[in-house]
Image: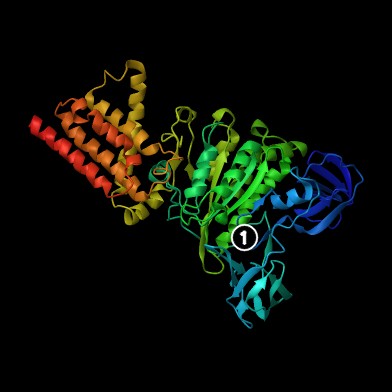
Amino acid sequence: MQIREINGPVVKVKNAKGVFMNEMVRVGNFKLTGEIIGIDGDIATVQVYEETSMLKPGEPVEGTGKMLSVALGPGLLGSIYDGIQRPLNELIKKSGSFIGRGIDSFGLDESKLWEVSFIKKIGDIVSGGEIIAEVQETEYLKHKIMIPPNINGKIIELKENGSYRVTDTLAKIETNNGIKEIKLYQEWPVKIPRPVKKRLEPKIPLITGQRVIDLFFPISKGGTAAIPGGFGTGKTITQHQLAKWADADIIVYIGCGERGNEMTEVLEEFPNLKDPRTGAPLMDRTVLIANTSNMPVSAREASIYTGITIAEYFRDMGYNVAIMADSTSRWAEALRELSGRLEEMPAEEGYPSYLASRIGQFYERAGISENLNGTKGSVTIIGAVSPPGGDFSEPVTQNTKRFVKCFWGLDKNLAYSRHYPSINWLTSYSEYSEDLKEWFSNNVEEKWNYYRDEAMKLLTEDDRLQQIIKIVGEDVLPDNQKLVVLIAKIIKVGVLQQSAFSNVDSFCSLEKQYNLIKVIMDTYNKAKIYIDKNIAISRVLPSEIVSKLLTMKEEIKNIDEFKEIENMMNEHFKKLDTIYN
């Protein structure tokens, strides 16, 4: 095969006989990594994942006989990859700070020895997905060595417990198609979802410790969420918080076409973070895929698939995995550029007509499932969307809304007024709220849903009143409406606002979230009684009471301290009874 023509990352190849769709190829004298995305007779279209400058027509193209795949095995956790699973630390050794072209590097450390404990024996009949051995990959996480999904048969040879490299053969299995070797790692094509036995209903929440999410717009394990917002609204910091605090076993963070300085911040910050649950480095349960906006545009598309395939692999072991994709808009821009190079008919705003189906294919790989080996695991996808100018009507945001069940819309006005997380409680929604009501009632408090619904009604009423206040001012409102505005302010500042840098409030347990909203809503319900008796709002809720309600999120470190707040409120209302009865 030879290069016929070059158009940016799209290369046409002649004499392409015997190749197949999605086959990985080596392009030109530099041996650049590419993937066949179209075949027309003996002309193949190749999408190249590296910079194509200085390539010339006539240079050779070699097929590899396999699809674009990732190596899955011990050593994934704590690694930092580029979009096609080349370890960045290995690339630095080979080419320095700027990634050279045509450098091929295996995704796992081939020299490191791993302690392997076998749980199967010779003669056992095994099928795809079954666990044959375990490796203690990090202090708190066991890596399970599984039979690849497409292999079934009898174990005829098995090593003993000991130290092995990822490329060592652990077992041989007799199958109907001959003898297959099982190594510590397996390869899987990134465009093909890994199979599961059964999809399950999403009934368990992913607890994030962020009140605006857990309390008002919860996401389930195996769910999908989008975080759309313009520049500076806090998409990245929100995803950092979720990566740090969410009760997922493993985090896969995909920096997809982000600015170099944002990705640098992630690369510098994550290795130094402590996992709040174990005290170990957060990187011990994190895989980073770093793909900045100055890297080749086509590698941006691959990074999303690389990340989801790694996540599915850990799901198959029975772990709960959360994917942070930052941002899917850059990925869509890569699709737009490639579509333009392929001279396809553009759709809305120049994006390809298949944009919606590609977004759908990505988000549909999320889910909670019963795996082939009988374990249960989940993949939760949280994708940031960067609409130009914060315009949620643009195609990527609108098509993403079709496939996600959680929409956490970031508001620039909230962000500029330093209200973080700047998730707008009026434009956001969660379709998991109904599915998770039973879990919250059974596992937190029976009246969780009651207080949540009442608070949302209050915030909606406050929004209506704010429109009136803009015209005539707050002073002309009757006291019962002033009370709504005041309590809504307490909810916004005292519950929805949360500092990522606070030692006390960066993470908020479900019990504390419930007690915060309970105290505020109980205060509202009691205050309403006195307002109806024509007692001035300044006497019903004096400034010291309001101040206490606004600051209790920071001041209360123990759930038992809420009793003191409740006693203080009861004493205050008893005094009002004494004075006005």
Q: Look at the picture and state if 470 lies above or below 307.
A: above
Q: Extreme bottom residue here?
A: 123
Q: Is residue 343 visible?
A: no
Left or right, 338 with respect to 467, comes to right
The one nearer the camera, 27 or 291, is 291
Where residue 77 appears, as percent x and y from the top left, is 60, 57
Left or right, 417 with respect to 160, comes to left
Q: Extreme left residue here?
A: 581
Q: Amino acid at mark 1?
A: Arg
Q: Residue at x 88, y 46 (%)?
A: 3
Where residue 73 appears, as percent x and y from the top left, is 65, 63
Where residue 325 appears, as percent x and y from the top left, is 58, 45
The one nearer the camera, 247 or 400, is 247
Q: Residue at x 32, y 33 (%)?
A: 490
Q: Residue at x 58, y 60 (%)?
A: 314
Q: Look at the picture and state if 462 lies above or below 38.
A: above
Q: Is residue 571 visible?
A: yes
Q: Extreme right residue here?
A: 58
The one nearer the camera, 317 or 14, is 317
Q: Extreme top residue here?
A: 472
Which scheme is used to colour this image of the protein?
A: rainbow
Q: Residue at x 49, y 34 (%)?
A: 410
Q: Residues within 10 Å of mark 1 (few under 14, many from 20)?
A: many
**Numbered label tally:** 1
Left or right, 553 with respect to 163, comes to left
Q: Secondary structure at mark 1?
A: loop
Q: Which residue is the site of mark 1?
A: 194
Q: Look at the picture and state if 530 lies above or below 288.
A: above
